[in-house]
Amino acid sequence: MSNSHSLKIYNSLSGKKEEFVPLEEGHVGMYVCGPTVYSDVHLGNCRTFVSFDIIYRYLRQKGYVVRYVRNITDVGHLTDDGEDRMAKGAKVARLEPMEVAQKYTVGFHELMQIFNTLPPSIEPRATGHIPEQIDMVQDIFSRGYAYERNGSVYFDTIKFAKENPGVYGQLSGRVIEDLLVETRDNLKSQDEKNHPSDFAIWMKARKEDLMVWKSPWSVGFPGWHLECSAMSTKYLGKTFDIHGGGNDLKFPHHENEVAQNVGACGCAPARYWLHTNMLLLNSRKMSKSEGNTISPFELFTGNSPFVSKGYDPMVVKFFMLMAHYRSTLDISDDALLAAEKGYRKIMETNRQLQAIAVNAADFDGSETDTDRKILSLIDDVFAGMDDDFNTAMAIASLNELGSYINKYVHQQIAANEIAPWVIERMKTVFSTVIFDIFGLRDETESGGDSGTMEGLMDLILAMRAKARENKDWAASDMIRDALAAVGIQIKDGKEGTRWEKIDV
Ligand code: AMP
Ligand code: ZN
């Protein structure tokens, strides 16, 4: 389904929305930093990957052939105390580091499927690309931006910044003096560096390090930032279209990636840098290291103090889509309840729309005001997506279309006010946007009886509340047990009784 707008993307490099023009007409190369697989991904990580899935889907929808590369970080990402996250995870669980990586990679894939995201075209692992990373260190060396100390190799940020003015700091807006403080590599090796903002591109192993490889400098392992530079170059070329990740990666990870690529080949890697904003919990960034996380499964089952009940993964995904990817998003039970309503409504509207059977013979072919309004709303849906993938705007326009569909179905507007071809176009637009672009599934009641189910449950819960008011505990328990027997669990809480379906 094509539309007439040009796609605008907010580019972190320029700090502006720019028209998207790929390097090669009709083709897009996109690299997104993937998860570090040393523990379960949390819901914040999911938000970033869901956002890029929608970007991927939308680019495809616009007719581009997209090569989407999303890596798996399975080595070299250090904790603040200088220990490799993978190795640390392995020691804690007494496993081989590769066992840890495999376990959490499988878990990540399962979750991505639950959220109905598409697999990337290539999913390279850092450990599978050590020779490429060693080559890149050599290239950086040969262009004079690296130095060796005791078997470790460091990137010379000061020399690089001097010789490439405006490059280091362009993404994060930081100046070199600020970089003195925040570096996320081995603190114990600070004294080996010429300057605190220099960062390791190869690290000599200590005897406790578990994942090590031979290199011209020492037995050791690559720095965390290097893998993305080496793998994006390998699969997308030295310069490619889009690089993405969460905005917490702008510094130091992405800043250092740019420096490495420019340092190795003299050319900038991505032309458009896209950064998703953070998912917040209690107004703070959801983060593994801060212990401020919620696991997606806790949300699905309702087994969390943050939620009053379980939410379907599609509701959680819809909650994410209700905000633009560059806005922060605060998760709360109320926001999820609102998303659940919104999700059910849009699915219900779609079912009603798809069920409309029109008789073309009844129409005289003239375009009505309602037709024109509907066509302009359809245009707004795509205008929203073309405006830096604004799913929130697209949903608002779909909802406005929904009110016409509702009125039409309930005969509040005359049947001949909407032309058959306009109805057909709405059918295509709804299913394309909600299923193909948003990647939602219809998990509301099959057969379109969700409204009936809700109504019946309201009635049953009202009867139970009445029984409890009359202290008729036997009747109240009987209702609860009978519901449990058919797979419906009820939970009494401060705000009344809620219900959810469970597996029996
Ligand atoms: P990590 O495994 O920590 O490297 O994170 C994987 C991806 O999730 C990166 O792109 C991060 O920027 C992103 N991310 C981490 N925390 C959040 C959050 N709270 N909200 C959105 N994205 C996040
Ligand atoms: Zn990366």
Image (cartoon, rainbow, N blue to C red):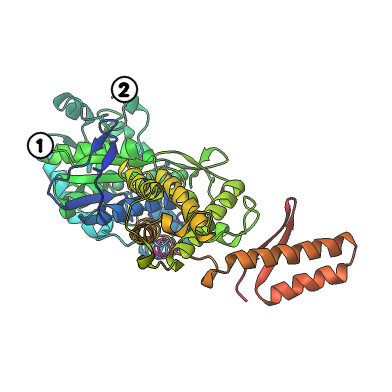
Q: Which is nearer the eye, 116 or 232?
A: 116
Q: Residue at x 26, y 45 (%)?
A: 243
Q: Which is nearer the eye, 434 or 220?
A: 434
Mark 2 — residue?
A: 177
Q: Where residue 255 sits in the image (x, y, percent)? A: 27, 36
Image vertical order of residue 398 relative to residue 142, above or below: below
Residue 143 badge: 1
Q: Where residue 401 sits in the image (x, y, percent)? A: 44, 51
Total numbered circles = 2
Name the residue furthest front: 364
Q: Where residue 331 sits in the image (x, y, percent)? A: 54, 46
In this image, 241 relative to 176: left or right?
A: left
Q: Secondary structure at mark 1?
A: loop
State which region is magenta: 106-114
Q: Which is nearer the eye, 33 or 49?
A: 49
The crowd level at tag 1 (other Cα within 10 Å; few <14, some 14-19, many 20+) is few
Q: Where residue 365 sits in the image (x, y, percent)? A: 32, 57
Image vertical order of residue 198 relative to residue 39, above or below: above
Q: Is residue 292 magenta?
A: no
Residue 455 badge: none
Q: Which is nearer the eye, 446 or 207?
A: 446
Q: Secondary structure at mark 2?
A: loop
Q: Main secondary structure of the magenta part?
A: helix
Check disc 2 and give the amino acid type. Glu
